[in-house]
Structure formats: structure tokens, C-alpha cells
């Protein structure tokens, strides 16, 4: 049964009779103006504090009610508003084969909302949307919309941010001035109707559990492009034979490959040629599909969704940027540059991350699957953060010569294992020097390899033009190498 929108005069006689007829009573929440009409009731308020998600709350409430009905034969469950309007627990109970659910009609906040707004929702086609699902539920829609469950300021902010980024200044200005109406505590003595604009949506009022939002018309639709893409990923997973067969493990090679293709696209960007953006757009899309693919698999398994992924990274970034979203002040004084500020930001990031993860070693969280050069640089950087490092590059440079001598000695001894170990030490020393010079060794080696490749392709072209067979075995090795060296020197002069 429902407890109405909030005012006692909106509670039906049928509801009061049901309370009187049952001794085992439950309330989804006691935070409602008419909750006191259900005395001696067990509430589920504590679950909202302890559970990790609303879905987990709804599942726990359902299980508790089913268990109580099993024990007592029949129980009363009271919810705010109407039991058939945006009540997930009621929907779960009706779908649960373990119990029979008798739903009693009640007045919802919608009836009061239409009266206060002076609109006929059927005639103008108002859509009712859950504020928690606004980005997906209202995708591609421009209104009119009535948005419920706007119970906190962060929900208001999320709703506001769900509208697509716009490039047209005129549209941006029009969107900012879009009128909206905030409806609060409808049907109670504290009822408040606030007319404001989209730009001021999350600054005008303090949202509470009896807040909803009316948007007559949006200047720009909500997240249309991404939601369509999200739905496409689901469709492919359900209908494409190849997609259906994939697992998290089988997709790993594709994820790695797409990541490297993004790296190539970034390397190929030309500030003076906007057409090079197209390649990056394409490769970022391929990488984004990998993220969606993994999330879709997890969603089908009932483990997590893309919304959990987005919420997780959103919340993590907010936590790790207290200088942006909190009260931490970064000291950027000194040499007038931003380097000091950046150093402080990174130090704060590491401190927050260590506290979140409960890590004891500086190397906790360093992925062992990183490419060798990147792995070495990451490990060295972690050790350097606790002071285990050369003060300058002058301390690191001599180690290259020292390790090179040890490679020569290992080669002279003819011990393959020692040669491999010493070569590893030499590479590690080179990475150390690169790190001190603020050069990414992976990028530097890739650039050097690309240069070598480009020059050798010139060698191949010159050899073809002059009838030289690079694969010939009928000349002496020294003579063949001399020919290649001459072509190489020519290639260097032209590249």
C-alpha cells in the first residue's frame, strides 16, 4: 500500500483500513511525512546506509519481506506515494514467485504535480523519468519530462551534466536559459514550487527526498549518441555469433591491440592538419567499444554495468582531486611555473590512492603485464617517491657504461643466462637515465624504431631502383654489408 505524496489529507481510507487490519507491518522508509500512520513498523532505512547500491537495497528489502510473509502468512508493506509509481521493491515483489502480492491503489505525487503545474500529462505527452536513470531513460528525448527521485544535490548535478556537450554558442545560450520547475514536498504544509533555469538548476534549491523536476522542453537531447552506442553493444552481444562467443579473457588481445592503435593515432596527429583527427576518432571508438563489450558481458552475468564503470571512475576522480572538488589548496608559488603545483597534485593522488587501497608496498598496484620498458619505468618511479633514487641524471649515466662492461664480461664467459641478466641490467639503467631526463623510454624507442624503419624502407627503394638484390647470397658478407651501409648513409641524408 501507498502513503500518498506527503499530506495526511491525501492518504486514502483503504490505506488506513489496511494498517488497522494487519499487525506485522513494514515501511520502506520512515523518512516520509505520513510514515507515522503505520505504527510499530519495521523500517529498512538502515539498508540505505550499509548497501553499496540501490539495487542491492531493493534486493535485500524484497528478501526480508518474502521471509516475513513466509513466517507470518501475510504482512503489510507501506511505501511513499503510490506502490505502482517508481517503486522498484513493489515491482520485485510482484515478479517474485515465492509470494502473492496484493497491491492497493493510492494517490501519488503525480496527481499533485499535474495540479500545481496546470498541465494535462496525457494531452502534452509528459514522460516520467527516474532521476537515477536520467542519462539513459531520457536519451534522445527533449521533453516534456517529469523527473522523480531527485533526492540529493548530486542527482540534480548528474541530470544537468547528462545533456550533450554543445558546440553552437546560440544553442548553448538557449540551453542555459531553458525554464525548469522544481517541485518539493508536494501536498504538505512545506510545499515549495521553484521556477528556475537549466543553468541554475543545481544552485537554486537544496534537494530532498520529496523533490522532483519538471522540464517543459530541453534545448538539447540527453546523451543520445552514447546511449545509442551502448544499445548497439548489447544488440551485437545478443545477436552476432562472434560477439556471443567472446569472454573477458578472449577479448584481452583485442583490448591490447586497440590500445596500441590509439597510441599510433596520437603519434600521427598533426596540429596543422585537422584530417589527422579522423584516425584518432576511429581508434578511440574502437577502444571504447572494448570497454562497452566488457561491461556488456558483465551486465549479462549480473555482475556490473557500464553505469557502474562510469560512476566508479567519476567518484574516484572526485576523491583524488580534492584541490578541485574539496578544500585542499595547492601551493603554486615559487618559480612561477605550474610544476610545483603538479608535483603536489601527484603526491596527493598517491597518498589518497594508498589510503583507498590499503597498500603496504610502494609497488602495490603496479601492473606486471606492462610492456618491459614501461614496467621498469613505473617500478623505478615508485622507488624514487620514497627517496631511493639518484639525485640527478649524472648519477645514473655512469651506470650505463658499467652495465655495458658487465655485458661484455658475460659474453666473454660464454654464459647465456648471465648475458641475459646483464643485458636486462643494461636496459634497466637506460630506462633510469630516460626517466631522469623526463623521456618516456617506450616512446623514445618507438620513435627510434620508426626512424630506422623509414630509413630502411628508403634503402629498399634505392636498392630496387639500382637493381641491387638485398637478399642476394652470392656476394661476400663484408661486401654486402658495405653496399647496405652506403645505401643507409644515402638514406640518412635524404630523411
Image (spheres, helix red, strand yellow):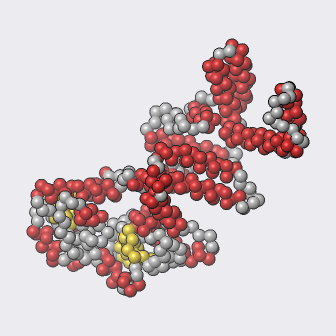
- In the foreground, 191 or 88: 88
Q: Residue at x 47, y 58 (%)?
A: 240
- The residue located at (72%, 18%) in the rendering is 408
Percent from the top left, x then y, of residue 168? 63, 73
Callout count: 0
Residue farthest along the top direction in this orientation: 413
Residue 355 lies in what quarter of the image? top left
Identify the residue at image location x=66%, y=45%. Answer: 339
Residue 374 lies, with reference to residue 63, above or below; the image says above
- Is residue 80 placed above or below 125 in the rendered structure? above
Residue 377 in sight:
no
Please determine whether, in this image, residue 280 is positioned above or below residue 359: below
Q: Quadrant of the N terminus?
A: bottom left
Which residue of the protein is positioned furthest toward the front in this rendering?
A: 474
Quadrant (top left, top right, bottom left, bottom right) of the C terminus: top right
Between 238 and 260, the residue placed more toward the observer is: 238
Left or right: 418 as drawn, with respect to 197: right
Q: Residue at x 76, y 59 (%)?
A: 272
**For this view, does 39 lie left or right of residue 96?**
left
The x and y percentages for residue 482 are 88, 30
Image spot of residue 42 (x, y percent): 18, 58
Left or right of residue 149, residue 277 in this image: right
Look at the image and tell me whether residue 38 can be seen: yes
Amino acid at each position: 500500500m501507498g502513503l500518498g505524496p506527503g499530506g495526511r489529507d491525501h492518504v486514502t481510507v483503504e490505506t488506513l483500513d489496511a494498517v488497522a487490519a494487519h499487525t506485522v507491518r513494514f515501511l520502506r522508509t520512515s523518512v516520509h511525512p505520513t510514515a507515522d500512520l503505520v505504527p510499530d513498523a519495521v523500517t529498512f532505512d538502515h539498508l540505505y546506509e550499509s548497501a553499496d547500491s540501490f539495487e542491492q537495497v531493493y534486493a535485500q528489502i524484497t528478501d526480508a519481506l518474502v521471509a516475513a510473509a513466509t513466517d507470518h502468512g501475510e504482512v503489510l508493506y507501506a511505501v511513499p506515494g503510490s506502490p505502482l509509481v517508481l517503486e522498484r521493491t513493489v515491482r520485485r515483489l510482484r515478479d517474485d514467485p515465492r509470494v502473492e502480492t496484493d497491491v492497493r491503489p493510492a494517490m501519488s505525487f503525480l496527481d499533485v504535480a499535474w495540479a500545481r503545474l496546470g498541465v494535462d500529462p496525457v494531452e502534452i505527452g509528459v514522460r516520467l523519468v527516474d532521476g537515477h536513470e536520467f542519462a539513459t531513460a531520457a536519451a534522445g528525448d527533449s521533453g516534456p519530462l517529469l523527473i522523480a527521485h531527485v533526492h540529493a544535490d548530486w542527482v540534480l548535478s548528474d541530470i544537468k551534466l547528462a545533456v550533450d556537450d554543445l558546440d553552437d554558442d546560440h544553442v548553448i545560450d538557449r540551453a542555459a536559459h531553458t525554464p525548469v520547475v522544481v517541485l518539493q514536498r508536494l501536498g504538505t504544509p512545506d510545499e515549495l514550487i521553484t521556477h528556475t533555469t537549466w543553468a541554475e538548476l543545481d544552485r537554486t534549491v537544496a534537494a530532498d527526498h520529496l523533490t522532483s523536476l519538471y522540464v517543459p522542453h530541453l534545448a538539447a537531447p540527453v546523451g543520445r549518441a552514447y546511449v545509442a552506442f551502448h544499445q548497439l553493444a548489447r544488440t551485437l552481444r545478443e545477436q552476432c555469433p562472434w560477439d556471443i562467443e567472446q569472454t573477458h579473457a578472449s577479448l584481452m588481445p583485442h583490448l591490447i591491440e586497440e590500445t596500441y592503435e590509439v597510441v599510433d593515432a596520437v603519434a600521427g596527429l598533426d596540429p596543422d592538419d585537422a584530417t589527422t583527427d579522423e584516425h584518432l576518432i576511429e581508434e578511440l571508438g574502437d577502444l571504447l567499444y572494448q570497454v562497452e563489450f566488457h561491461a556488456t558481458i558483465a551486465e549479462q552475468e549480473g555482475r556490473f554495468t557500464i553505469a557502474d564503470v562510469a560512476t566508479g571512475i567519476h567518484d574516484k576522480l572526485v576523491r583524488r582531486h580534492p584541490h578541485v572538488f574539496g578544500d585542499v589548496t595547492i601551493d603554486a608559488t615559487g618559480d612561477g611555473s605550474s610544476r610545483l603545483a603538479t608535483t603536489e597534485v601527484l603526491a596527493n593522488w598517491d597518498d589518497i590512492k594508498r589510503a583507498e587501497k590499503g597498500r603496504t608496498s610502494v609497488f602495490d598496484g603496479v601492473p606486471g603485464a606492462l610492456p618491459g620498458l614501461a614496467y621498469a619505468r613505473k617500478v623505478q618511479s615508485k622507488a624514487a617517491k620514497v627517496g631511493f633514487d639518484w639525485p640527478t641524471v649524472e648519477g645514473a649515466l655512469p651506470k650505463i657504461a658499467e652495465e655495458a662492461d658487465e655485458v661484455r664480461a658475460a659474453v666473454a664467459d660464454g654464459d647465456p643466462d648471465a648475458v641475459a641478466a646483464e643485458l636486462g641490467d643494461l636496459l634497466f639503467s637506460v630506462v633510469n637515465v630516460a626517466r631522469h631526463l623526463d623521456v618516456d623510454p617506450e616512446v623514445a624507442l618507438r620513435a627510434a624504431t620508426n626512424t630506422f624503419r623509414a630509413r630502411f624502407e628508403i634503402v629498399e627503394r634505392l636498392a630496387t631502383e639500382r637493381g641491387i638484390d638485398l637478399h642476394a647470397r652470392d656476394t661476400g658478407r663484408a661486401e654486402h654489408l658495405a653496399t647496405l651501409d652506403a645505401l643507409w648513409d644515402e638514406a640518412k641524408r635524404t630523411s
